Amino acid sequence: MSALLFAGGLVFTIGNVSGTGLGTDAMIGLDPRLGGALSAVVAIGIFLSRRAGVAMDRVVIILGSVMIVLTGYVVITSDPPIGQALRSVVLPSHAEFLVITTLIGGTIGGYIMYAGAHRLLDSGVSGPPYVRDISRAAVGGILLTGLVRVAIFLAVLGVIAGGATLDPANPTASAFQHAAGEFGLRAFGVVLWAASIACVIGAAYTTVTFVTSRTKTSEGTRTVLVVLFIAVSTVIYLAVGTAPAQLLVFAGAFNGLLLPLGIGVLLWVAWQRPDLLRGYRYPRRLLCLGGAAWLLTVYLAVRSIVSLF
């Protein structure tokens, strides 16, 4: 699982670097490749500075709030066909399994859920006494992420339904520009850039922790590996030459394919290895629900592999 998560983390870091490029393009009109390279240097600087990292966490929270407000404004002004959208949730005209897998993979696939767990571990939140806190963090995170994704979808849907044509190189940014003008474009660029920078750092750090040991690997060695990981990901991004938007889609799809393995291992531990959980036993209803979710991810992965490759 660590080997595949390392591969998934590499893909996602490349995608996140491309996301910073999209952000600088929307923010100041900078070429995405140059913007991605400069942003990677900034990400390394933030990672090496503990004070800058704490500040970045706070900035991302503030900008996330701005994103929610801005998206809500675009939803209201674009007036999307909400009734039609709700009907298609229940009775879609057709199902694109690769799209579904990409969305799930981009939300909880690959390194993302492990990054959240690692942040809790680093802050000392672990063990059965913290089950309620851990559950609250997990549920709150997925609900907020789902809310933002639905809001952005409705915002873009409203813009398209109004007859606008989106720029394929940066479709979401152009949707915000159509709905909120130049301010919407620049504000979206700032938020996307900051979020992507945070994800570059989070993906690289989490990926390295999966292939190193807390007890055998020194902090200095881990720091060097994280910096090298970001640098290599950036070089690959510059060498691939694929449009950033396509890289982000590929990253989400690839990490969606890793879901069955990750969930399967965790379910096996929950069912068979309570000794690894300090004797804690999960409620059987949650284990059964997890098993059903695992079967669904297997089905989606199998249906998506042909479409992806």
Image (cartoon, rainbow, N blue to C red):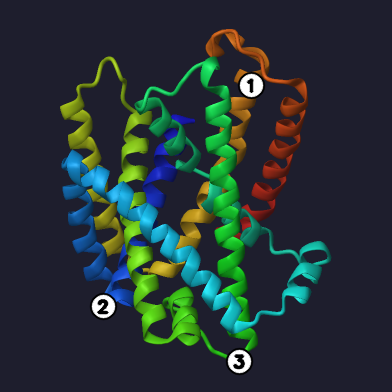
Q: Mark 1 packing: few (<14 Cα in 10 Å), some, or many (20+)?
A: few
Residue at mark 2: 28
Q: Say which quadrant the C terminus sits in.
A: bottom right
Task: Please say if 294 is above or below 163.
Answer: above
**Residue 290 pos. (x, y %):** 70, 32
Residue 50 position by quadrant: top left
Residue type, mark 1 in image: Trp
Residue at mark 1: 268
Name the N-terminal-most of marks 3 and 2: 2
148 or 5, nearer to the observer: 148
Q: Residue visible at 62% across and 81% down?
A: 158
Residue type, mark 2 in image: Ile
Residue type, mark 3 in image: Gly
Q: Can residue 167 be seen in the rendering of this structure? A: no
Q: Residue visible at 27% across and 80% down?
A: 29
Q: Mark 2 packing: few (<14 Cα in 10 Å), some, or many (20+)?
A: few
The Cα–Cα distance between marks 3 and 2, rounded to whole angstroms, is 26 Å
Task: Please say if 249 is above or below 185.
Answer: above
- Checking the image for residue 163, the label placed there is 3
Name the N-terminal-most of marks 1 and 3: 3
Q: Residue visible at 55% across and 53% down?
A: 145
